Image: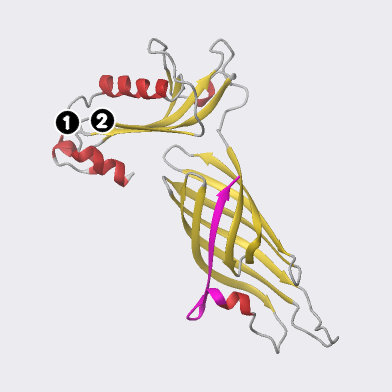
């Protein structure tokens, strides 16, 4: 939002950005675009195809409700949509515009829809919350997962639109089967604003007891539970995350307090998690 607001302060015309999940055929110029203010008014026979953000400063050219909605409809038709659900609409005061502050920026955001049948009834029985579900594979290291490299961890995420931001929850699991079977599992909850994310997971990690080739006792077993807050950058199909890991429970053999893999991410006295998620 900060970047877009900054563009609005220096640009001479409205800035409209439409982000769609995949390519759709553009609509005809004479096709109409319907504006909705309530989710339950959208016809049942429709699908959300993307999101839209528009902004400008009223002191610039063509920055009024009529002009910006006209430009928004043109952008939506080019993206293949025919309806917009407004999720955030702010009109600045004249004083804030003259001061060139972020509060003086005209701001419009919403969800872009492709309505297949406008004659279908509105979804008044079950309110639409536009949940987006995604699967990711993850590569990382840290107390949350141990090591997920040769065999990545798999993640399920469910996103909910909250107008000016998104919330999400997820479940992740991984297993390492080379040399020894060790596994991890965690549940998380977070918030997303533009490309920035913050979430925290509660995870468990287990490593079995091993024996050496000569039959003598090897390392293990190891078990711990951790709290893992992480900040991230999510763009397109890639998600980068990093953050500290706080041990809640640690059950290690007394004579084997350290585990080599986890020491890779220890900085000072604190352990950290680093991961890359790729959408599938």
Q: Is residue 78 visible?
A: yes
Circles 2 and 1, Cβ within 8 Å, touching? The answer is: yes
| Secondary structure state at the residue bearing disc 2 | loop
Horizontal placement of 218 versus 18: left or right?
right
State the predominant SS element of the stretch in magenta. strand
* Magenta part of the chain: 264-280
For marks 2 and 1, the one nearer the N-term is: 2
Q: Quadrant of residue 145?
A: bottom right
Q: Residue furthest left?
A: 98
Q: Residue placed at 49% from the left, 63% from the top? A: 242
Which residue has dot 2 on it?
A: 14
List x then y, in percent, for residue 27.
44, 16
* CA gap, disc 2 and disc 1: 8 Å
List x then y, in percent, for residue 182.
73, 68
| Residue 116 is one of the magenta-drawn residues | no
Q: Quadrant of residue 152?
A: bottom right
List x then y, in percent, for residue 123.
58, 21
The C terminus appears in which quarter of the rendering? top right
Residue 60 disc label: 1
Q: Quadrant of residue 142?
A: bottom right
Q: Residue placed at 24% from the left, 38% from the top? A: 8
């Amino acid at each position: 939002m900060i970047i877009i607001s900054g563009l609005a302060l220096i640009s001479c015309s409205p800035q409209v950005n439409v982000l769609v999940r995949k390519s759709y055929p553009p609509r005809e110029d004479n096709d109409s675009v319907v504006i909705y203010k309530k989710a339950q008014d959208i016809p049942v026979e429709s699908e959300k195809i993307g999101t839209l953000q528009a902004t400008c400063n009223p002191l610039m050219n063509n920055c009024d409700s009529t002009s910006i909605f006209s430009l928004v409809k043109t952008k939506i038709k080019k993206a293949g949509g025919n309806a917009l659900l407004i999720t955030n609409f702010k009109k600045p005061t004249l004083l804030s515009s003259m001061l060139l502050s972020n509060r003086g920026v005209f701001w419009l955001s919403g969800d872009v829809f492709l309505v297949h049948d406008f004659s279908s009834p509105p979804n008044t029985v079950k309110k639409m919350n536009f949940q987006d579900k995604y699967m990711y594979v993850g590569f990382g290291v840290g107390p949350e997962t141990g090591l997920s490299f040769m065999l990545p961890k798999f993640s399920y995420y469910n996103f909910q639109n909250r107008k000016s931001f998104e919330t999400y929850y997820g479940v992740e699991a991984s297993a390492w089967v080379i040399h020894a079977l060790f596994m991890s599992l965690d549940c998380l909850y977070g918030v997303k604003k533009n490309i920035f994310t913050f979430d925290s997971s509660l995870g468990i990690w287990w490593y079995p007891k091993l024996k050496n080739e000569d039959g003598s006792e090897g390392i293990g077993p190891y078990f711990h539970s951790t709290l893992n807050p992480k900040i991230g950058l999510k763009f397109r199909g890639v998600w980068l995350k990093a953050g500290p890991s706080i041990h809640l429970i640690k059950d290690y053999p007394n004579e084997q307090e350290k585990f080599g893999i986890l020491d890779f991410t220890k900085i000072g006295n604190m352990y950290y998690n680093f991961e890359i998620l790729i959408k599938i």
